[in-house]
Image: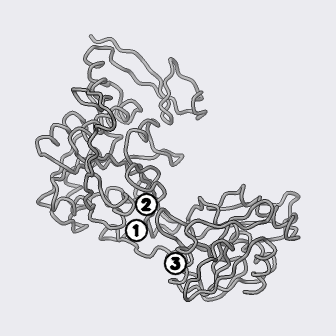
Amino acid sequence: MAKTKRAYVCSDCGADFPRWQGQCSACAAWNTITEFTIPKTKAAVGASSAVNSYAGASTKVQKLSEVEAKDVPRYSSGIGELDRVLGGGIVPGSVLLLCGDPGAGKSTLLLQSIGAVAGHKAALYVSGEESIHQISQRALRLKTPNLDKINVVAETSVEQILNLVSQQKAEFVIIDSIQTMTVAHNDSAAGSPSQVKESAAALTRYAKTEGVTFLIIGHINKDSNVAGPMQLIHIVDGLFALSSTSDEKFRVLRTSKNRFGADSESCFFAMTEQGMKQVKNPSAIFLSRSDKNHAGSTCTTLWEGTRPLLVEIQALCNTSVTENPRRLSVGYDHNRLAMSIAVLARHGGVMLTDMDIFVNCVGGIKIEETSADLAVLLAIFSSFKNAPIPQDVLVFGEIGLNADIRPAANGVERIREAAKQGFTRAIVPKANASRQVSGIEIIPVEDLQEALAAFDRVC
């Protein structure tokens, strides 16, 4: 009988410990350490070494100058917006991880993609969660093309899956999902940190040596992080997250990691009975405002990967009934909110110490850049003054602690996108006003005082 040993691994970071403990000393997470067993046999050691080896059977050291640089052509996923997020298409031999909430549409999106790819590539759909009959029903409902060219199998053994990939000579493989996969030399349960890590490592090694593309579906935990060890993110070539907007009408696909493209790209889909429909103009989604102007509402433009995105920012100032006024923000960093309020008080003479202040980015968008600072500040000022900002005014720019307004990257492209959406005026940093854009009046500002003067001008 093979001897086994117990191990305790953190499901968040993958750190291992000799015994169980409540908090992981590596990542400080609580209640994330789980127990599993590892067979202590020579076969297990040999298999584990093979799984974690990326070099192949023979390893040869070469000079970097002697290595041939191969320009591998990409091929389309069949979905234009998905191709853009991937960096221009699918790279052969890549391993991509798609995660998201249950019901977000991960399986639907990849089933639509494999239908398009199967027209020119040998495709295999591997399901560890659903039966092949359930997949067939969904494919018929989505009217997936090339059904006669898509191979499907219900299997959870990584060794068996790789044998099938080799037999079928598959070039495009979907794994649904990595949490259900297992390797034979590991006795722990499916979904455990060690099984997830070694299954992903085995698939990645095969992809790199044979040039097969794997699109892997992954689960997320209660903290909206990828379920499994942190090593999983390091192993794969790309990490993409599919989530819903606040009204559940649209799906947002965001890039967290991409070795073959921009790591801050995003795209939008509308979920329908016929599957995921591409949204070519996402700015129109977040600018569907009423015809009536409201104080505290302004529009700004964010840079999402390789294109601008127009969003609405709302602010509300209300007299506080407590000793400690509330400062709440949804989609905007609360630390930058506190900074904007302090700058407005110090350099603008607007005291908000007795006011509750609420800021919201419409549509569930989370602002990651600083170019929205000026829009947030003017939205707060608009609510405080009860003076609506006209709907044809765009605002963007970063605010410094000394009240200077700094430029944003790709300023001309932001203004052009606003002009396409019907905006006629733009309050922007002076450094972004060096080039005129037809159809829109540019109001350059250099500091907070000039921005407040521009506010009075447009209002």
Q: Secondary structure at mark 3?
A: helix
For this view, does 435 lie left or right of residue 126?
right
Give the amino acid type for the residue marked by disc 3 in the picture: Glu
> Which residue in the rendered view is the most extreme toward the front?
65
- How packed mark 2 is, by other alpha carbons closer than 10 Å (few <14, some 14-19, many 20 or more), is many
Q: Name the foreground residue: 174 vs 442.
A: 442
Is residue 242 shown above or below 223? Answer: below
For this view, does 337 lie left or right of residue 79?
right
Give the amino acid type for the residue marked by disc 2 in the picture: Leu
For this view, does 105 lie left or right of residue 143?
right
**Residue designated by label 1:** 269
Residue located at (29% from left, 55% from top):
90
For this view, does 254 lie left or right of residue 51?
right
Q: Secondary structure at mark 1?
A: strand
N-terminal of the pair, mark 1 or mark 3, is 1
Instruction: Report x, y in % for residue 287.
Output: 55, 78
**Residue designated by label 3:** 417
Q: Secondary structure at mark 2?
A: strand
Query: Of the residues tagged 3 and 2, which is closer to the observer?
Result: 3
Residue 267, quarter of picture? bottom left
Residue located at (58% from left, 85% from top):
423
Distance Cα–Cα, label 3 vs label 2: 21 Å
Distance Cα–Cα, label 2 vs label 1: 8 Å
Residue 377, quarter of picture? bottom right
**Residue designated by label 2:** 253
Distance Cα–Cα, label 1 vs label 3: 20 Å
Label disc, if present, on residue 393 of the rendered structure? none
Instruction: Report x, y in % for residue 323.
Output: 88, 58
Q: Quadrant of the C terminus?
A: bottom right
Q: Are marks 2 and 1 in contact (CB under 8 Å)?
A: yes
